Image (tube, rainbow, N blue to C red):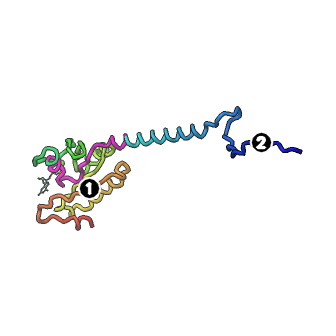
C-alpha cells in the first residue's frame, strides 16, 4: 500500500502554537506580564513619592547641647545667642543638591517627644547634637533619648549623625570617648 506523504517539500514542520478553543492565540500570559509590569511601576512610583516627600533634617539632642546656635550658623550664617526654646525653629538649608528644611526642635524632656513625633515622618536625616563637655554627667539622658530615636520605625534606614559639639572647650570629650 502506498504511504501518503504529509510533508511533501521535506521542510521541517512548525511546532503548534498555543491556541484557544476557536484557534485564537492564548493572550493570558501576555496580559499577566502587562499587569505585573504595571503593578511594579506603580509600587516604585509610590515608594519614590514617599521618599521624596521627606525634606527635613532634624536637629535634636538635649537642652543646651548647641542645636539653636548650629541652626543660626547654618540657616542665617551668623551666631545668634539663643534662649531656651519652647518652639521649633524652621529654616531653609541650601545644599549642593538642592534645598532642605532644617528643623531645630526643643530639647526639653517634656517637649522633645511631642516635636519629634510631629516631624519624624517628614525627616530625611537626623543630627543628634551632644554637648561633649557635659556628656558624661548626662549620659543616661543622652542614651535614653538617642535610643528612643534609633528605635523609632519612622527613622529606620535613615542617616543619623551624632555631632559631638563644643569641641573648642578644654574639658570636651573627644568622639572616641563619647562613642563608648
Ligand atoms: N563653647 C561652645 N559653646 C557653644 C557651642 N555651641 C553652643 N554653645 C553654647 O551653648 C549654649 C546652648 O546653646 P543652644 O544653641 O541654645 O543650645 P540648645 O538648647 O541645644 O538649642 C549657648 O550658650 C551657646 O552659646 C560650641 O560649639 N562651643
Ligand atoms: Mg534651642
- Residue 135 vs 38, above or below: the answer is below
Precedes in sequence: disc 2 or disc 1: 2
Which residue does the numbered mark 1 point to in the structure image?
A: 161
Local SS, label 1:
strand
67 in magenta:
yes
Within 8 Å of ligand 1, the CB of disc 1?
A: no
Q: Position of residue 10 (x, y in %)?
A: 72, 45
Q: Is residue 18 magenta?
A: no
Q: Quadrant of the N terminus?
A: top right
Q: Which residues are magenta?
A: 49-72
2 vs 1, front mark: 2
Within 10 angstroms of label 1, few (less than 14), some, or many (20 or more) residues? few
Q: Is residue 137 above or below residue 58?
A: below
Q: Estimate the spatial distance between the alpha carbons at disc 2 and disc 1, rounded to whole Å.
A: 78 Å
Q: Quadrant of residue 43?
A: top left
Residue 42's spot in the image, x, y percent?
A: 45, 39
Mark 2 beta carbon near ligand 1 (under 8 Å) = no
Amino acid at each position: 500500500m502506498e504511504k501518503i506523504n504529509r510533508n511533501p517539500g521535506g521542510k521541517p514542520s512548525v511546532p503548534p502554537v498555543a491556541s484557544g478553543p476557536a484557534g485564537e492565540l492564548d493572550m493570558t500570559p501576555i496580559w499577566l506580564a502587562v499587569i505585573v509590569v504595571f503593578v511594579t511601576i506603580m509600587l516604585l512610583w509610590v515608594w519614590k513619592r514617599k521618599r521624596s516627600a521627606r525634606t527635613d533634617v532634624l536637629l535634636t539632642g538635649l537642652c543646651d547641647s548647641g542645636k539653636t546656635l548650629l541652626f543660626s550658623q547654618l540657616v542665617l550664617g551668623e551666631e545668634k545667642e539663643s534662649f531656651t526654646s519652647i518652639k521649633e525653629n524652621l529654616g531653609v538649608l541650601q545644599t549642593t543638591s538642592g534645598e532642605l528644611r532644617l528643623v531645630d526642635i526643643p530639647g526639653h524632656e517634656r517637649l522633645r517627644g511631642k516635636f519629634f513625633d510631629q516631624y519624624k515622618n517628614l525627616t530625611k536625616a537626623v543630627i543628634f547634637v551632644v554637648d561633649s563637655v557635659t556628656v558624661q554627667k548626662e549620659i543616661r539622658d543622652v542614651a535614653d533619648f538617642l535610643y528612643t530615636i534609633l528605635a523609632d520605625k519612622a527613622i529606620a534606614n535613615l542617616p543619623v549623625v551624632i555631632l559631638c559639639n563644643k569641641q573648642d572647650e578644654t574639658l570636651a570629650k573627644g568622639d572616641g570617648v563619647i562613642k563608648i
